[in-house]
Image (cartoon, helix red, strand yellow):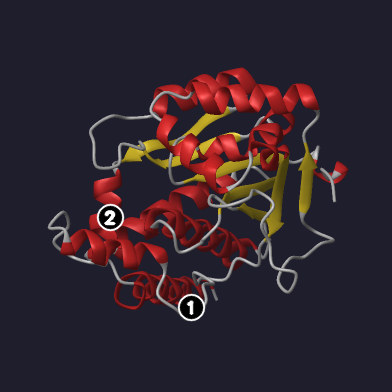
Amino acid sequence: MEFKTDLHDKKAVLIIAHPRHELRVFNWLTQAHPSVLILTDGSGRSSQSRLKETKRILDETEAKPGAIFGAYTDKYIYEAILNRRTDVFIQMAELISDVLSQEPNAYVVGDAAEGYNPAHDVCRLVINTAIQLIYIRTNKMIPSYDFVLTGPPDTFSTETLNVERSILLTLDDDMFERKLQLLKSYEGLEIDVVETFSQCPPDAFRKELLRWTDNNITDGLPDEMPYYEKHGEQRVAEGKYHFVLRRNEHMLSIAADLRDYLEQVKLHTQ
């Protein structure tokens, strides 16, 4: 697998939940120069935005901030999921579909749903909903890829990976060193980098795997408790959270609402 020559003529759009996710696909950024849409400012539980650091990386790779660039806080997204504010995610999907509709030869790269962080997973739901909206209205399916945000960057299942359509990039020494330096210099990411490198060696980041996606409106996770739910239970027990965000009660309910919305749009376009 390698970067597809037929994508050089297409407009790349990167859609991620948080600033810093772009580092996972830094080599691709330098080739594709995408328009970058970021749902949150990356502030987490603090009030410190991480957009400035990401803007520096985009400038270096000739990528451009898009129509959504840290418009929401992590707290806002979390509460929207917890309160099943599907209207928030419909609004995001409609805006993204408008952006993509203005690019006749667009393709999308974005966060994978992994059950690690609900913002990552809802970002994938929003991406898939936007792409389905375009398909319903124009009968055009935009190529879409995801990439993992936890564990080795080339993680995949042999049962689900579409090898023919997916893209695997291997960085040369200069690009690899450039990527590592950016990872280490990204302000506020120091602890995350140490933790990541303790789980997998730095050399793992020589590879960037963009996995072809089918755009289904589901999180695609196995039928077991995801990490974010276990983490939420621990935080509630510690007195740091008041509620646990549940996959079945919250995430899958939002996915069902989004599917219902798509059905309504389909009825109105017939």
Q: Where 233 falls versus 241 (above or below)?
A: below
The extreme bottom residue here reads: 223
State whether residue 48 appears in this view. yes
Q: Which residue is mark 2?
A: 78
Q: Tell me residue 17's x, y (percent).
A: 44, 46
Nearest the eye: 160 or 131: 160
Q: Earlier in the sequence, mark 2 or mark 1?
A: 2
Quadrant where the C terminus sits is: bottom right
Q: Where does residue 252 sit, x and y in percent of width and height?
A: 39, 75
How would you rate the neighbour count of disc 1 (Cα within 10 Å): few for under 14, some for 14-19, many for 20 or more?
A: few
- Kindly identify the amino acid type of the residue bearing the numbered disc 1: Leu
Quarter of the view holding residue 115: bottom left
Q: Position of residue 258 (x, y in %)?
A: 42, 70
Nearer to us in this view, 70 or 184: 184
> Label 1: which residue?
267
Q: Quadrant of residue 49?
A: top left
Q: Height in image: 22 above or below 138?
A: above
Query: Is residue 109 toward the left or the right of residue 93 in the image?
Result: right
Q: Position of residue 148 (x, y in %)?
A: 58, 53
Distance between the alpha carbons at the discs numbered 2 and 1: 31 Å
Residue at image coords 38%, 29%:
50
